[in-house]
Each structure stands twice: as structure tokens, then as C-alpha cells.
Amino acid sequence: MTEYTKKPHLRDFEFAKHHEYETVDAINKEPPYLIDVLNRFKKKKAAKYAFIIIAFVILMSIIIPMISSRTYYDQTTKHAYLPPKVPLIENLGIFDGEVNGNDMYKNKGAEGTYYVFGTDSLGRDIWVRVWQGARISLYMALLAIIIDLIIGVTYGLISGYYGGKVDMIMQRFIEVLNGIPDTVIVTLLVLIMNPGIMSITLALVIKGWIGMSRVTRAQVLKLKNQEFILASRTLGSSNMKIIFKEILPNIMGQLIVMSMFSIPSAIFTEAFLAFIGLGLSAPNASLGVLISDGFKSFLSSPHMVVIPTIILSILMFSFNILADGLRDAFDPTLKDR
């Protein structure tokens, strides 16, 4: 053996310096799912503005009918067809109650009185009636969500999970039901009941959940053969436990987004039925009723139809934008876009 192997040099073997070789495992903590969704939603400026607008409409529809000195059904016939007149803004030459240079408020003995959105053919305050009507639209929005998440989701979960003959029978029933026009259903309900919000509510209960059930079924079909579902079934989990504790939480984001997209359709349905006389009737107020009443006097008093139409359009557009923002927030594939 060589002398080197017999007497190894001390520097051939050295202890590693602890501070030079020390490593620390870096753990990147992912934020909770809902926090991650909220962070992505905050990046969507249009969706945030839409949410603010919807919150404003909700607040106004609650407060204005409560604090106003006039109710939505109070009539002052001598103040009929008054144009909008807004304090302070009237000094700018707009919303000053004048039509073609004529002070309509002075002509009808309403000096010192302000109608922010003007009055209708019976002298009712459109400002109060619009926000009272917004309550009906918001009720339809809430009703659409409840119907979708209770009836539509349950129907779709059962149809998609069990499949086979159960799925075939349930889907054939939907196809037959979906083939009946909404107007026919509402008309039949009106013949049995008085025209009003109850007939529209029942019409939505009968057909309003079909779109949600189909989306839910498609999501269930995509997930029910995944490994975590098979593992849960192997461990002895019941069908109800698999459906409501394994599948439903994984598709809830898509269902919430779908329910948001159904809101504008429900709002428009109420407005359309009220416009053609199958919805609410006077003296009740909804945006559809206001548009229907204002349309009769569109040439002489355009504010009667323009104002509720703008409010209805803004509300429907805001819900669409909000739903689009929620879709992007709940979809992880759009995280970095």
C-alpha cells in the first residue's frame, strides 16, 4: 500500500460546516379555496362594479319605499304626467320639470314639489314605484337561485349518479316538460289563479330548474367514475353520502355560477309577462308593469317607459357581468389569465 493510503492527510476528511450546508425545507402554503376564489374575483373590475350596482339596487329597493312620504299606490291625479324634477340638479337646466320651455309643475300647481322620476298617468310617484318594482325583480332573482339549487341540483344529481333506466326516464320527462312553452303554462295558471306573482312563481317552479338539472347531470357524469369516488364506494360509503359529501362539494362552484346566469332570465320573464298582462296588475308595481304602463304614453311622456327600462337593463346586465366574474373566479384554469 502506498504511503498516502496508510497515512491519509487530515485535510482529506473534514467536517462540513453546519452554516454552509444547512438547508431549510420551503413550504409554500396554498390559500384556502374560498380565499383563492375571492382573490381572483377581486381582479375582475367589471364584476366588482356589477356587484356594487346590485348592492345599491338592493339597498334602494329596501329603503326608499320605507322612508318615502308617498306610497307606490298613492294617486294625485292633478299631478299626472309630470316630468322628472331633481333638487339642485334643476339649476343646471336638466331634470327641471320643464317640457319645451313650459314649467309643467307650475302649470299643474305643483310648485315646491319634486318627483325625481316624474309621475305616471294617475299622478303616482314613479321614483317610489320603480324601487318597489325592483323588489319584485330581486324576488325573482332570489327565487331563481332557490329553485335551481334545490330542485335543479337534486334532480340532476340523482339522474346523473344512478344513470341507466333512472336517468333515461328522468331525462325523457324533462324533454316533455321543456317542450311546453312558458307562456302556455303561465296562461293556464292565470285561468286557475288570479294574475300575479304567485302564478309566475309556480311557472318557475314547474320549468325554471331544467337548465340547472342538465348542468348538474353533466358534472356528475364527469366525476362519478373518478378514483376518489371509487375509493369512497369501496370503503362502504352509501350513495347519499357519495352524492352529497363527495360529488356535490366538487361541483358547487359551477352550480353557483350557473344559478347566477339564470337570474337575468327569471327577471326578464317576470317583466315580459307583466308587459303582456299575464303578470302583476295595477296598482301593484313591478318594472314590467311600469314599462307596460309607460309604453302607452311613450310619445307624450317618454320618462314613464325610459326610466324603468334603464333600471331593468342595468340590473340584468349587472347580474350577467357578476356571473361572468364568478365563473372566472371559480375556474382554476383561468387563474393566471
Image (tube, rainbow, N blue to C red):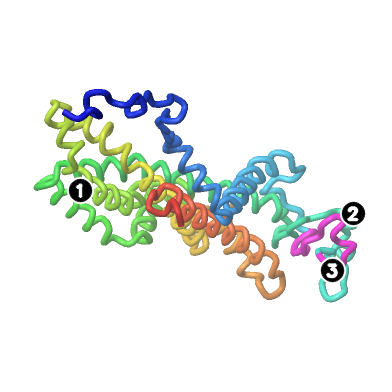
The residue indicated by pointer 2 is 112
Under tag 1, what secondary structure? helix
Q: Quadrant of the N terminus?
A: top left
Q: What is the CA distance from the residue labelled 2 to the residue labelled 1?
A: 66 Å
Q: Which residues are magenta?
A: 78-94
* Residue on which the image places disc 1: 221
Residue for badge 3: 98
Residue 219 at x, y percent in the picture: 26, 48
Count residues near mark 2 (Cα–Cα under 10 Å), then give few for <14, some for 14-19, many for 20+: few
The kind of residue tagged 3 is Glu
Task: Give SS at disc 2.
Answer: loop
Dot 1, how many residues are within 10 Å of its Cα: few (below 14), some (14-19), or many (20+)?
Answer: some
Mark 3 or 1, which is nearer the eye? 1
Q: Is residue 170 left or right of residue 138?
A: left
Q: Nearer the viewer, residue 141 or 18?
A: 18
- Magenta portion: prevailing SS class: loop
* Residue ranking furthest to the left: 165
Q: Residue at x 45, y 38 (%)?
A: 34
